[in-house]
Amino acid sequence: MGRRKLKIQRLENLKARQAKYSKRKPGMIKKANELAVLCDVDLALLLFSPSDQPTLFVGQKKALSDVLERLSKMSFEEREARYRYYQ
């Protein structure tokens, strides 16, 4: 019995959404940590659960203020250009 392809779409049931979030959050944080370590990048990951509980992960011994300071030093046009690139 193989795995079936799941459609990526919003779960309508709040309990199901919270359960899926709880199962996937550790994997997302692990991937963020791997990216920060392997690529030596400054990284900040902010997640809000379906019940509005925040989770913050900042990679590689950097403070959130350091990451936000780097972002604030970029011009608005440069931030917009980088944002549009990944959409």
Image (cartoon, rainbow, N blue to C red):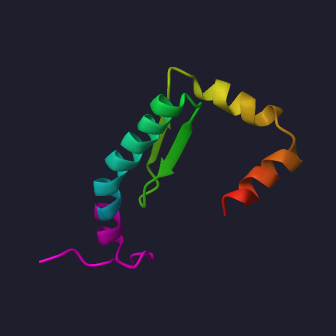
Q: Is residue 59 left or right of residue 41?
A: left
Magenta-colored stretch includes residue 79 = no
Q: Tell me if residue 33 comes above or below residue 81 in the rendering.
A: above
Of all residues, the one furthest to the left in this rendering is: 1
Of residues 16 and 85, the one nearer the viewer is 85
Q: Count the labels in the image.
A: 0
Which span of residues is magenta-colored?
Answer: 1-19
Of all residues, the one furthest to the top in this rendering is: 61
Residue 31 occupies quadrant:
top left
Q: Position of residue 29 (x, y in %)?
A: 40, 42
Does residue 58 appear in this view?
no
Which quadrant holds the N terminus? bottom left
Does residue 63 appear in this view?
yes
Q: Position of residue 58 (x, y in %)?
A: 51, 32
Q: Tell me if residue 67 comes above or below residue 20 in the rendering.
A: above
Majority secondary structure in the magenta region: loop
Q: Is residue 53 left or right of residue 6?
A: right
Q: Position of residue 57 (x, y in %)?
A: 47, 36
Q: Residue at x 82, y 32 (%)?
A: 73
Of residues 8 and 11, the one nearer the viewer is 8
Q: Is residue 49 left or right of residue 77?
A: left
Q: Position of residue 7 (x, y in %)?
A: 39, 79
Magenta-colored stretch includes residue 7 = yes
Q: Residue at x 66, y 24 (%)?
A: 66
Of residues 50 and 75, the one nearer the viewer is 75
Q: Residue at x 66, y 58 (%)?
A: 86
Residue 87 occupies quadrant:
bottom right
Q: Tell me if residue 22 comes above or below residue 15 in the rendering.
A: above
Q: Is residue 43 left or right of residue 16?
A: right
Q: Residue at x 79, y 47 (%)?
A: 79
